Image (cartoon, coloured by chain):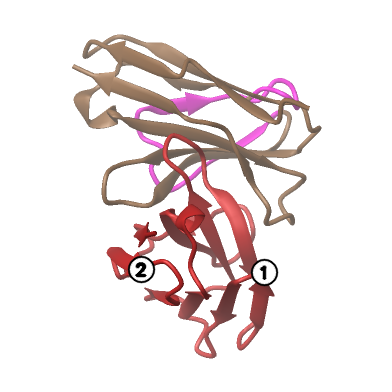
């Protein structure tokens, strides 16, 4: 099992560019989520999904889109990157939404200039 | 969003010392969790707490779910160098879909 994988590991974007952060898990987990981590702050939930075809907003969803067409993949899209989106992004998954043990990916460090 | 106040922000201790950190919330939580994050990696779950007053241990780690359901504590006994990292509290309020995280306690252990 590879667990939760994220690509890319690092990315630099110019303001206004778009990109997709990839997240995949091979544990057949139903629940997947995206967080951002900023210096001096805890992780903040962006979007989450309780299964294929179902997504919902977290605490800080503005500027981000998600979709969940398969159980394995949960990409995060930035349609028009802004400097305020400079952060480290973590994807996580758990068996289902009653399972508290989330497995986190290694993170993607994004810089928007 | 929900405010989780975690303290202290950072700690510098000697190997072998005990460590205490805590987390408080303005809202009642129905679960409390404690994570550890090593540099360059994602957080890893250490302990999960499910009911008020619960005291749970995981090796040298002990965590408690406060009676008011608005706080939680993590203790590490006899610290070792590999305890270095950032410790986060987290919790859920209504369901297990949305997790809220504290800002972290950075632990440094001197050999």
- Which chain does tag 1 point to? B
Is residue B25 covered in magenta? no
Pointer 2 or 1: first along the chain = 2
Q: Quadrant of residue A111?
A: top left
Which chain is painted in brown?
A
| Res. B30 in view | no
| Quarter of the rendering occupied by the N terminus of chain A | top right
| Res. A108 in view | yes
**Residue A96 location, x and y as percent?**
75, 47
Residue on which disc 2 sits: B14
Residue nearer the viewer, B21 or A16: B21
| Quarter of the rendering occupied by the C terminus of chain A | top left
Task: Left or right? Give the position of A64 relative to A92.
Answer: left
- Residue ID at (42%, 75%): B17
Q: Which residues make up the magenta segment?
A: A53-73
Residue on which disc 1 sits: B58
Task: Left or right? Give the position of A58 relative to A17.
Answer: right
- Residue ID at (51%, 73%): B78
Residue nearer the viewer, A71 or A27: A27
Residue nearer the viewer, A104 or A76: A104
- Relative to A106, say whether B2 is above or below: below
Is residue A57 covered in magenta? yes
Mark 2 or 1, which is nearer the eye?
A: 2
User: Mark 1 packing: few (<14 Cα in 10 Å), some, or many (20+)?
Assistant: few
- Relative to B89, say whether B68 is above or below: below
Give the drawing colour for chain B. Answer: red
**Residue B30 location, x and y as percent?**
60, 73
**Residue B32 location, x and y as percent?**
56, 69
- Which chain does tag 2 point to? B
């Amino acid at each position: 099992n590879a667990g939760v994988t994220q690509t890319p590991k690092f990315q630099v974007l110019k303001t206004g560019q778009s990109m997709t952060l990839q997240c995949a898990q091979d544990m057949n987990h139903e629940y997947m989520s995206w967080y951002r981590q900023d210096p001096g702050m805890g992780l903040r939930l962006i979007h989450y999904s309780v299964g294929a075809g179902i997504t919902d907003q977290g605490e800080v969803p503005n500027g981000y889109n998600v979709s969940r067409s398969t159980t394995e993949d949960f990409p995060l899209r930035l349609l028009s990157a802004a400097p305020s989106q400079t952060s480290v992004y973590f994807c996580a998954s758990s068996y289902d939404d009653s399972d508290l043990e989330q497995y986190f990916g290694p993170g993607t460090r994004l810089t928007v200039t | 969003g929900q405010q989780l106040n975690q303290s202290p922000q950072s700690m510098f201790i000697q190997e072998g010392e005990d460590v205490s950190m805590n987390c408080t919330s303005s809202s009642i939580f129905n679960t409390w969790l404690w994570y550890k994050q090593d540099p360059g990696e994602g957080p890893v779950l250490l302990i999960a707490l499910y009911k008020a007053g619960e005291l749970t241990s995981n090796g040298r780690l002990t965590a408690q779910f406060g009676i008011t359901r608005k706080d939680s504590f993590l203790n590490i006994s006899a610290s070792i160098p590999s305890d270095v990292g950032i410790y986060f509290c987290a919790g859920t309020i209504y369901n297990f879909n949305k997790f809220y995280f504290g800002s972290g306690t950075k632990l440094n252990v001197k050999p």
